[in-house]
Amino acid sequence: MIFATVAGNVGKDAELRKTADGASVLSFGLAVERREGGEKVTQWVDVSIWGKRGESLASYITKGSKLVAVGDLTLTEKNGKTYLKLSVHDLTLQGGVQRSDPAARQAPDRSADSGRRDEIPF
C-alpha cells in the first residue's frame, strides 16, 4: 500500500451506499490530468470515503468538483487492466463548495457587505 495525495476533478456525483454489514461508503471517480509528451493524459482514480465522514460529504462531492484527496493508494488488476483505488484519510474541496441541491448552488446575497471595504495592506 502507498500513501498518496491526488488532485483532480470528480467525474460524476458521488454515490453513497451501505455494505452488507451496514458500513457506509461514499464512492466516486477522480480524473487526474498530466502532460505526457505534449499531450494531456487523464488517469482515473476510484476514491472511497468510509463511515460518517463519507455520509457528511455526499452532497458536496458532485460532478466537476475539484478536490485534493490524501489516503492509501492500492493497485488492483482486473481483466488485464490496472485500477488505482484511494481510501481517503483527508479531503480538501477546492474552488468553493457545491451541493446537489440546485437552490444551494446560487450565489449568496452579499448586499449586507456592500458598504464594507476590506483593504489589502500590500
Image (spheres, rainbow, N blue to C red):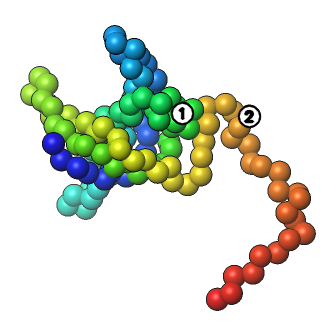
Report if residue 12 is visible in the image: no
Residue at image mark 2 = 103
Q: Residues within 10 Å of mark 1 (few under 14, many from 20)?
A: few
- Is residue 117 depicted above or below 86 in this figure? below
Q: Residue at x 74, y 48 (%)?
A: 107
Residue topped by disc 1: 56
Residue at the image position 20 percent from the left and 34 percent from the top: 83
Residue drawn 88% across and 57% down? 111
Q: Nearer the viewer, residue 47 or 105?
A: 47
Q: Name the amino acid, label 2.
A: Ala
> Is residue 66 in sight in this rendering?
yes
What percent of the width, then of the height, locates residue 44? 30, 40
Q: Is residue 82 above or below residue 70?
A: above
On residue 43, which mark appears?
none
> What secondary structure is found at the residue carrying circle 2?
helix
Quadrant holding the C terminus: bottom right
Point out the residue furthest to the bottom here. Answer: 122
